[in-house]
């Protein structure tokens, strides 16, 4: 340990050390659990939508089709879009995983989970939702969904994680955001011309299933992101450079 690091730790208060340990526990438990299932498809979306909403109906069908093709379904574990996707996977007998957190609109895990982990901190939960996936599907949602979308896209934009497929399901919902990027941010050079290619808008859940099938089924206890940050010769970094 460097001398400056030793001094920094010595200057931390008890409260800071306890907080750091709590963060580490949340991350450690999550990393341990996600190694027990293969990377699947993480599905994001609103916790507030009823199950008869058209987007929930589509999410349930997506969860079922992913399970039929042998892919684990990962969500935030709550109601709304998450419950629908988990329900679809669960009713087919697939792996249905919920990474839950207690919120005002997301108090309890939904009943369609084969695996569940409760988180205390948003950032730890987001790390696991990202690392659990080989494909990301974003259904309509609120600020939480937007937070997750922008964080994952910027990590891909800045080459901090592999560029994996991101689908924005529901073109009519997502098109205004894409238009804002195209007509406001890109002309102002706040984003580059390639940034809008990180994601794809779709109204067809089969696009998501096909992307997962194309990537295939990684072995349990392996992860596409292993060594990505440290190794410039990582296979996924080489693929991005092509």
Image: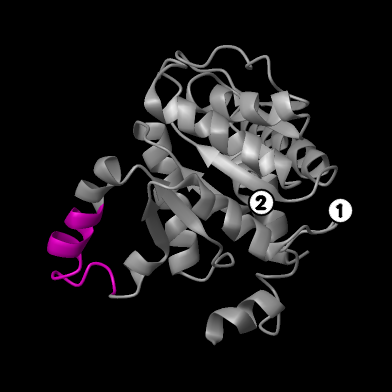
Residue at 41% x, 33% y: name it.
144
Task: Give the residues drawn in magenta, as a range.
Answer: 178-192
Residue 4 in sight from this viewpoint: no
> In the image, is residue 125 above or below residue 9?
above
Q: CA distance from mark 1 to mark 2?
A: 12 Å
Can you say which quadrant of the picture contains the C terminus? bottom right
| Spot occupied by residue 115 in the image (x, y as percentages of width and height) | 77, 28
Numbered tag placed on residue 221 in the rendering: 1
Label 1: element kind: loop
Residue at 53% x, 18% y: name it.
79
Say if mark 1 contacts mark 2, CB within 8 Å.
no
Residue at 81% x, 38% y: name it.
33
Indicate whether residue 27 is drawn in magenta. Answer: no
Indicate whether residue 189 is drawn in magenta. Answer: yes
Decide if residue 28 is on the left or right side of residue 139. Answer: right
Residue at 55% x, 12% y: name it.
107
Provide the residue designation for mark 2: 131
Q: Specify the quadrant of the image occupied by residue 142.
A: top left
| Spot occupied by residue 199 in the image (x, y as percentages of width and height) | 41, 60
Who comes first in sequence, dot 1 or dot 2?
2
């Amino acid at each position: 340990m460097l001398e400056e690091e030793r001094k920094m730790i010595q200057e931390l208060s008890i409260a800071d050390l306890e907080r750091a340990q709590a963060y580490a526990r949340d991350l450690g438990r999550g990393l341990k659990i996600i190694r027990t299932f293969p990377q699947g498809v993480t599905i994001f979306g609103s916790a507030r939508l009823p199950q008869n909403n058209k987007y929930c109906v589509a999410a349930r069908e997506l969860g079922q089709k992913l399970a039929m093709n042998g892919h684990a379904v990962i969500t935030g574990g709550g109601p709304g879009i998450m419950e629908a996707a988990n329900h679809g996977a669960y009713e087919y007998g697939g792996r249905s995983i919920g990474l839950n957190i207690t919120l005002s609109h997301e108090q309890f895990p939904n009943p369609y989970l084969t695996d569940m982990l409760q988180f205390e901190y948003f950032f730890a939960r987001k790390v696991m939702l990202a690392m659990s996936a080989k494909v990301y599907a974003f259904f309509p949602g609120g600020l939480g969904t937007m937070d997750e979308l922008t964080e994952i896209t910027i990590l891909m934009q800045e080459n901090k994680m592999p560029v994996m497929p991101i689908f924005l399901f529901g073109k009519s919902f997502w098109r205004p955001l894409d238009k804002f990027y195209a007509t406001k941010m890109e002309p102002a050079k706040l984003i580059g011309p390639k940034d809008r290619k990180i994601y794809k808008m779709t109204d067809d859940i089969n696009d998501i299933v096909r992307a997962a099938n194309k990537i295939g089924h990684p072995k349990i206890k392996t992860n596409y992101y292993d060594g990505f940050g440290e190794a410039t010769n990582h296979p996924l970094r080489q693929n991005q450079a092509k």
